């Protein structure tokens, strides 16, 4: 998978892509490309850097579920200091060893950054990812509250003036295309 900041048609030439999504958030347009091509192959393409990946299932099952349109991506956008990426990854790695991701319905989690912009992608089997995140907030699950508290030292709101709850950090999906599904 690759994340391109307003990549336009540049990613459409990639014949290995099996899903393209476009999200908007405040002043950003973000293109997310799931493909058979490793993100590391695209250094210099102006893409975000992935610093954490958790697959709740085998990678082949993940690709198959995405190709078939069974998974839905929710994207959280905030700000971070790129030097904090390893600590943020450690916090999520600790959380992802528990049953919390499965309880929440998370099937894959990826953390990316582009300069100081932080992208947290969660794939769910249902389309209501925003509602799932809101429910975790309302349920006050101690693990969710703990990771939110722990992340406050590393993650800043993209736009603090418009933020009231975690769902305010969720980007809006404006397009999904599965050209080779």
Image (cartoon, helix red, strand yellow):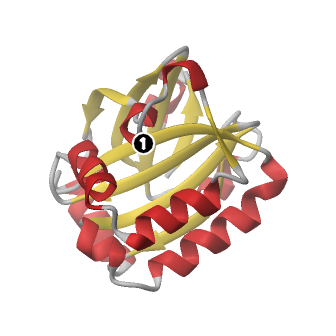
Total numbered badges shown on the rendered structure: 1
The foreground one among 39 and 151 is 151
Is 55 above or below relative to 28?
below
133 shown above or below 146:
above
- Horizontally, residue 111 falls left or right of residue 79, namely left
Q: Is residue 156 left or right of residue 4?
A: right
Say if 115 sits above or below 105 in the image.
above
Q: Position of residue 169 (x, y in %)?
A: 46, 35
User: Does the rendering let one see residue 159?
Assistant: no
Residue topped by disc 1? 166
In what element is the residue under mark 1?
helix
- Location of residue 148 in the rendering, given as x and y in whole percent from the top left corner: 53, 57
Residue name at image x 43 percent, y 72 percent = 143
Q: In the figure, is residue 82 to the left or right of 126? A: right
Q: Nearer the viewer, residue 95 or 49?
A: 95
Residue in front for this viewpoint, 172 or 65: 172
Task: Please tell me which residue lies in front, 42 or 160.
Answer: 160
The residue shown at (41%, 31%) is 168
Q: What residue is drawn where x is 23% and y is 53%?
A: 135
| x and y, in percent, of residue 172 in the image | 34, 27
**Most distant residue in the top direction:** 27
Residue 15 found in image quarter: top left
| Residue 174: % across, % down | 30, 23
Q: Residue furthest right?
A: 83
Check disc 1: other Cα within 10 Å, few if <14, some if 14-19, many if 20+.
some
Q: Quadrant of residue 103?
A: bottom left
Kindly tell me whether residue 178 is visible in this rendering: yes
- Residue drawn at (78%, 57%) of the image: 84
């Amino acid at each position: 998978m690759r994340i391109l900041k307003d990549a336009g048609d540049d990613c459409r030439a990639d014949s290995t892509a099996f899903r393209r999504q476009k999200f908007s958030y405040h002043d950003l347009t973000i293109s997310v490309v799931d493909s058979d091509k490793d993100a590391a192959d695209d250094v210099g393409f102006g893409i975000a850097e992935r610093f954490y990946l958790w697959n709740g299932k085998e990678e082949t099952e993940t690709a198959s579920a995405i190709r078939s349109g069974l998974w839905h991506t929710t994207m959280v956008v905030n700000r971070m200091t790129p030097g904090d990426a390893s600590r943020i990854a450690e916090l999520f790695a600790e959380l992802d060893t528990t049953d919390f991701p499965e309880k929440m319905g998370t099937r894959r989690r990826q953390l990316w950054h582009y300069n100081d912009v932080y992208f947290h992608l969660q794939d769910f089997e249902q389309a209501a990812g925003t509602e799932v995140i809101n429910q975790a907030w309302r349920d006050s699950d101690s693990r969710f509250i703990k990771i939110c508290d722990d992340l406050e030292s590393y993650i800043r709101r993209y736009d603090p003036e418009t933020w009231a709850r975690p769902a305010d950090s969720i980007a809006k999906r404006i397009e999904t295309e599965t050209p080779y599904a």
